[in-house]
Image: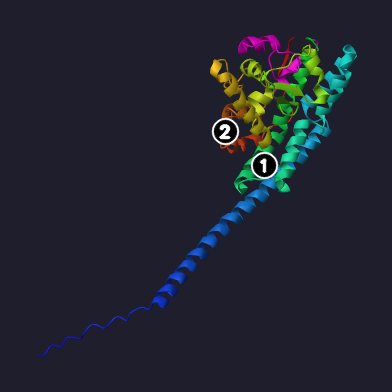
């Protein structure tokens, strides 16, 4: 038997041009797949963004209607309290007229929520990604929840109650004396719930540290303290309870306002921290809330963080689903106190 061996076929050498063409084809295929993946991701992101825009628009409209049809209990109380106190303290007429506007869609917090929604809708504010836009819209929706917004109006109700020197009862909060004892703070004057809330003023810088400068329509609060300003360092360590600061700040503060708060705090910490007397205004929650809605309780339990914590914004979306439930007429807690 004769065994024949077949020689292996010779491999044809690949030309440089053919190799380049092969690599180019693979690169084009990779780019095509990458673009498809990005397109799919963007499509999903755009769809979610559109959905959140629609939900936020509905939330804003629903809140405006609730405010302008006297549906919110605390809005009704603001009107009634302002009318009563105008009779007994006519010198407060112009201030009370301004505060009574908060029972309608002229409310500065409502107007801020609407502006934040429109900034995303009209693309007039820069966001790093669609996900950041979605997060901002979810915060606006949380703030526009009628039950939560009704609770937020308790700050104005209680400011008017404090101006009455005990004639009118507080709502959603313990008496002023009890609250001071609970938090080991001193009486900082009527209107102190508004200090640090960017809808009523701003922190202005001086050689002695930042002090609270009221917007013109609220300047009367300054005269109630004999013209003495609230200095940031003193206020930060000794502030009392307010709904804005201890429950609703995350929802009712825009990104630019939050950046301004952070800048002031960092400046004050640098100026006073070395002396050992500095405390962040949000190093701890203040006690004093009563009778809040489920929406506000969810906020208080799951989202309180220092506004100067890097992780505070990352957790903002975790509670948005729980804030979309709850009734309007939830403010049943009333306490009388000077």
Q: How is the model colour-coded?
A: rainbow
Count of labels in the image = 2
Marking on residue 312: 2
Residue 335: x and y in percent read 72, 13
User: Does residue 168 sit above or below 1 in this rendering?
Assistant: above
Marking on residue 240: none
Residue 250: x and y in percent read 64, 32
* Left or right, 220 with reference to 237: right
Q: Quadrant of residue 242?
A: top right
Quarter of the image with the N terminus is bottom left
Residue 18: x and y in percent read 41, 77
Taking the spot 88% from the left edge, 16% from the top edge, the residue there is 86
Residue 71: x and y in percent read 80, 31
* Left or right, 89 with reference to 194: right
> Is residue 229 or residue 10 the one in the foreground?
229
Taking the spot 81% from the left edge, 10% from the top edge, the residue there is 167
Q: Nearer the viewer, mark 2 or mark 1?
A: 2
Q: Secondary structure at mark 1?
A: helix
> Is residue 101 or residue 58 the one in the foreground?
101
Where does label 1 land, which residue? 137
Q: Quadrant of residue 55?
A: top right
On whether residue 191 falls in the magenta region, the answer is: yes
Q: Are marks 2 and 1 in contact (CB under 8 Å)?
A: no
């Amino acid at each position: 038997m004769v065994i024949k061996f077949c020689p292996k076929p010779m491999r044809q050498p690949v030309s440089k041009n053919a190799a380049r063409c092969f690599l180019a084809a693979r690169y084009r295929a990779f780019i095509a797949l990458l673009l498809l993946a990005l397109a799919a991701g963007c499509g999903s992101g755009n769809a979610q963004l559109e959905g959140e825009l629609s939900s936020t628009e509905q939330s804003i409209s629903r809140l405006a209607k609730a405010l302008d049809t006297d549906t919110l209990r605390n809005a009704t109380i603001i009107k009634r309290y302002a009318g009563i106190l105008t009779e007994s303290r006519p010198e407060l007429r112009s201030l009370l007229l301004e505060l009574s506007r908060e029972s309608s869609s002229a409310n500065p917090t409502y107007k801020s929520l609407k502006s934040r929604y429109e900034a995303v809708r009209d693309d007039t504010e820069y966001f790093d990604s669609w996900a950041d836009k979605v997060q901002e819209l979810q915060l606006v929706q949380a703030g526009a929840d009628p039950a939560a917004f009704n609770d937020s109006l308790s700050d104005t109700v209680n400011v008017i109650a404090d101006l009455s020197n005990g004639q009118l009862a507080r709502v959603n909060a313990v008496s002023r004396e009890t609250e001071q004892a609970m938090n080991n703070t001193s009486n900082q004057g009527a209107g102190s719930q508004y200090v640090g809330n960017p809808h009523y003023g701003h922190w202005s810088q001086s050689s002695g540290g930042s002090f609270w400068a009221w917007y013109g329509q609220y300047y009367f609060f300054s005269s109630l303290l004999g013209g003495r300003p609230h200095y940031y360092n003193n206020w930060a360590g000794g502030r009392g309870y307010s709904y804005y600061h201890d429950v609703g700040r995350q929802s009712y503060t825009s990104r630019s306002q939050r950046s301004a708060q952070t800048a002031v705090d960092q400046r004050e910490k640098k100026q006073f921290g070395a002396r050992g007397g500095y405390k962040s205004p949000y190093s701890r929650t203040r006690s004093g809330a009563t009778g809040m809605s489920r929406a506000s309780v969810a906020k208080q339990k799951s989202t309180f963080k220092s506004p100067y914590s890097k992780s505070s914004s990352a957790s903002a979306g975790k509670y948005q689903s729980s804030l979309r439930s709850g009734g309007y007429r939830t403010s049943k807690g009333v306490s009388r106190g000077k």
